[in-house]
Image (tube, grey):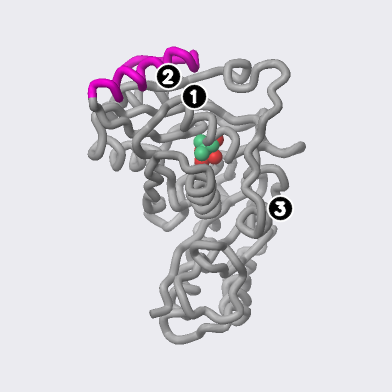
Amino acid sequence: MEIVSSISRMQELSALARRDGRIIGFVPTMGYLHEGHLSLMRIARKKCDVLVVSIFVNPTQFGAGEDLAQYPRNIERDKKLCREEGVDVIFLPDEREMYPENYSTYVEVSGNITNVLCGYFRPGHFRGVATVVAKLLNIVQPHFAVFGQKDGQQLAVIRRMVRDLNYPVEIVGAPTVREPDGLAMSSRNEYLTPKERKVAPKIYESLMLAEKMIQSGIFDPEIVKDRMRRVIEEAKMFRIQYVEIVDAETLEPVKKIESPVMVAVAAFLGKARLIDNIVVNPR
Ligand code: PAF
């Protein structure tokens, strides 16, 4: 496994692999790897000859007052896990390498897709995500890149960016990996106290209830959202940011559930901002 911190070396390795007709698979991460990341690597490993994982806590996707400084990091553990998953290259740039002095180019995916859900509550977040992912795709030059459905809006935004900017890359969506009690795996679960961790699965419980309601023929999103909120609020520990039901592809709000929808929740539990979603097809 090679650890590469320079952009030029990463581009050189990718050019060599492509010249030899080797398929490059890519998993972008911010490190502090958990089973969710490892599942993305396993999906990629099966489909590629060269597996590249990037580890970069991207400052441009954090807003003022967010958790950039506290974001959990453990690079030695991450390297060990990557080695065990058969990763060929870790791309591990520092901030200066990615954003040199006078850096001034950003990618903005505009419209509803970035204005709703997390985009509404974290202005500038998806501009930072789109910018860093656009850069990483240019640096790693993968044939495909794998992203988790856990960050459902991020996946939709990246698909849109790749389509709009004609990136010659396949975006692969991967199922959310959950703890046995349903809590979606996330590096930010680290912030939960034992008491908070106990009630955290309420979010998944509310998503499961939504699925059951929709599949039993309740197609009014307001009725479903109201019941979901009540489930989460039972714990009296969450500060809900949003409970939304939107079109699964465009993320447009829906008045009636008639086609696949993304049911999505974001809520603070202590210091942790937890997000989760499921896609439900009413048919
Ligand atoms: O999902 C993440 O970990 C990040 O948003 C990503 C895609 C690596 C970009 O920094």
Relative to 169, does residue 204 appear above or below in the rendering? below
Q: Amino acid at mark 3?
A: Phe
From the viewer's perspective, is 277 left or right of 116? left
Q: Are the two marked residues, 3 and 2, in contact with CB atoms closer than 8 angstroms?
A: no
Ligand 1 within 8 angstroms of badge 2 C-beta: no
From the viewer's perspective, is 103 left or right of 282? right
Q: Which residue is at the far front?
A: 166
Cα–Cα gap, marks 2 and 1: 25 Å
Q: Give the residue number, with chain letter if any, for mark 1.
A: 74
Cα–Cα gap, marks 1 and 3: 28 Å
Where's the N terminus, which quadrant? top left
Check residue 4 for magenta coloring: yes
Structural crowding at the residue carrying mark 1, measured as other residues with C-alpha within 10 Å and reported as few (<14), some (14–19) or many (≥20): few
Instruction: Give how far across and how far down residue 129 sits, in percent.
Output: 59, 39
Q: Give the residue number, with chain letter if any, for mark 3.
A: 121
Q: Earlier in the sequence, mark 2 or mark 1?
A: 2
Structural crowding at the residue carrying mark 2, measured as other residues with C-alpha within 10 Å and reported as few (<14), some (14–19) or many (≥20): some
Instruction: Give how far across and how far down residue 96 sits, in percent.
Output: 62, 16
Q: Give the residue number, with chain letter if any, for mark 2.
A: 11
Q: Nearer the viewer, residue 78 or 135?
A: 135
Check residue 114 for magenta coloring: no
Label 3 SS? helix
Label 2 SS? helix
Q: Amino acid at mark 2?
A: Gln
Q: Which residues are magenta?
A: 1-20
Structural crowding at the residue carrying mark 3, measured as other residues with C-alpha within 10 Å and reported as few (<14), some (14–19) or many (≥20): few
Q: Earlier in the sequence, mark 3 or mark 2?
A: 2
Q: Earlier in the sequence, mark 1 or mark 3?
A: 1
